[in-house]
Image (spheres, helix red, strand yellow):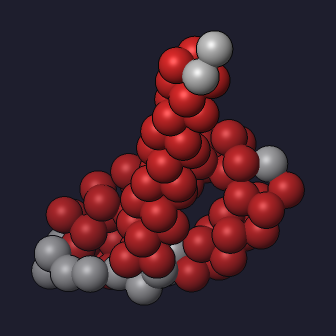
Amino acid sequence: MTTEQAIARSKSYVTPAIIIFFLYGLLWLPGLVANWMYLQDARRMQRIAGESLPGAGCLSVMFWFNVGLAALAALAGCVILAAGVLGQ
């Protein structure tokens, strides 16, 4: 095992996941950006370590959940807009 692998294996993303969880509640867009940045770092470190790292899965779930919520909100907005236009 190389030094780089040892460093990567000692990395944990639990604390950033907790912070991002609360950041989503305060400010959604900065939470999404921070989540994306930490998720990319976690993926890179997992490739180096060759194994799953603590908290990385939580970052992924939170990211895709919030992207899904944004997509649903956009779809709901389009439906409401279309209903308003067709109802006139």
Count of numbered badges drawn on the protein: 0
Query: Can you see residue 4?
Result: no
**In percent of the image, x 20 and y 81: which residue is there?**
51
User: Which residue reaches farthest front?
Assistant: 88
**In percent of the image, x 63 and y 69: which residue is there?**
16
Q: In which quadrant of the rendered image does the C terminus lie?
A: top right
Q: Position of residue 32 (x, y in %)?
A: 59, 48
Nearer to me, 49 or 3: 49
**In percent of the image, x 68 and y 69: which residue is there?**
21
Q: In which quadrant of the rendered image does the N terminus lie?
A: bottom left
Q: Is residue 73 above or below residue 88?
A: below
Nearer to me, 46 or 74: 74
Q: Quadrant of residue 43?
A: bottom left
Nearer to me, 10 or 25: 25
Determine whether, in the image, residue 63 is placed left or right of residue 5: right
Q: Is residue 42 above or below residue 14?
A: above
Q: Is residue 12 above or below residue 60?
A: below
Q: Position of residue 73 (x, y in %)?
A: 57, 44
Nearer to me, 76 or 63: 76
Determine whether, in the image, residue 61 is placed left or right of residue 1: right
Q: Is residue 19 above or below residue 72?
A: below
Q: Position of residue 25 (x, y in %)?
A: 79, 62
Determine whether, in the image, residue 39 is placed left or right of residue 82: left
Query: Can you see residue 65?
Result: yes
